[in-house]
Amino acid sequence: MRIDIITLFPEMFEGPFSHSIVKRAKEKKLAEIHLHQLRDYSTNKHRKVDDYPFSGGAGMVMMIEPIARCIETLQNERDYDEVIYTSPDGELFDQALANQVSIYKNIIILCGHYKGVDERIREHFITKEISIGNFVLSGGELAAAVIVDSLVRLIPGVLGDESSALSDSFQDGMVSPPVYTRPRDFKGWEVPEILLSGNEKLIFEWKNEQALLRTKERRPGLLDE
């Protein structure tokens, strides 16, 4: 999978993409992540990429020309399955959407800033808008990092145990059941006996029961969906 990220702050991705699962995916060449500094596509001598909104009002707006130039340059080099814009009013990102996008070969992610991008970018270049929650961030970089991490771990071969991602929370519409490891007894707090029984059928039933119970208690809205 190739992911091209258009951003004003490429340095913000150095930490998230240099460790753990994403780093492993890049080392295995299962994922390519390319960062594009939007200011490199500005024709302004000061590399300006924003301007005041027509009709006035507070804040600045990301200009259409640098963004269009960057996207068109990338699209001239290869075909893209999606051009994604991280936006507060986009489709709410969830596991089902992550599963869908993770099978794509090439995607572009545009990180928004200021009061947003010129609406014509959204109308003519963006194919999918994604929000990671009902709150506002200073920019789209953090949202893009979250999306990338969620996608990359789903690529076959990235995780040591390929079945691991399939047992994550939300994959079956519920949160995960409780998990335990050694020691078996800590200060009198014992691991549920069923998990030590070796009876795979009973363990499977227990995990499903616990997942359903935990979902009802903590995330009942998932069951409504």
Image (cartoon, helix red, strand yellow):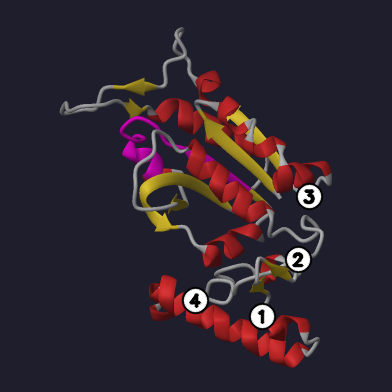
Question: Front-most of 161 and 4?
Answer: 161
Can see residue 36?
A: yes
x then y, percent, for residue 148: 60, 47
Asked if 142 appears above or below 221 in the picture, the reply is above
> SS for tag 4?
helix
Q: Are marks 4 and 2 in contact (CB under 8 Å)?
A: no
> SS for tag 2?
loop
Distance CA(mark 4)–CA(mark 1): 16 Å
x then y, percent, for residue 73: 59, 32
Q: Residue at x 74, y 71 (%)?
A: 184
Q: Residue at x 34, y 30 (%)?
A: 114
Q: Residue at x 58, y 72 (%)?
A: 176
Mark number, residue 43? none
Mark number, residue 183? 2
Distance CA(mark 4)–CA(mark 2): 24 Å
- What type is the residue that disc 1 sits on? Pro
Q: Residue at x 36, y 47 (%)?
A: 88
* Quadrant housing the C terminus: bottom left
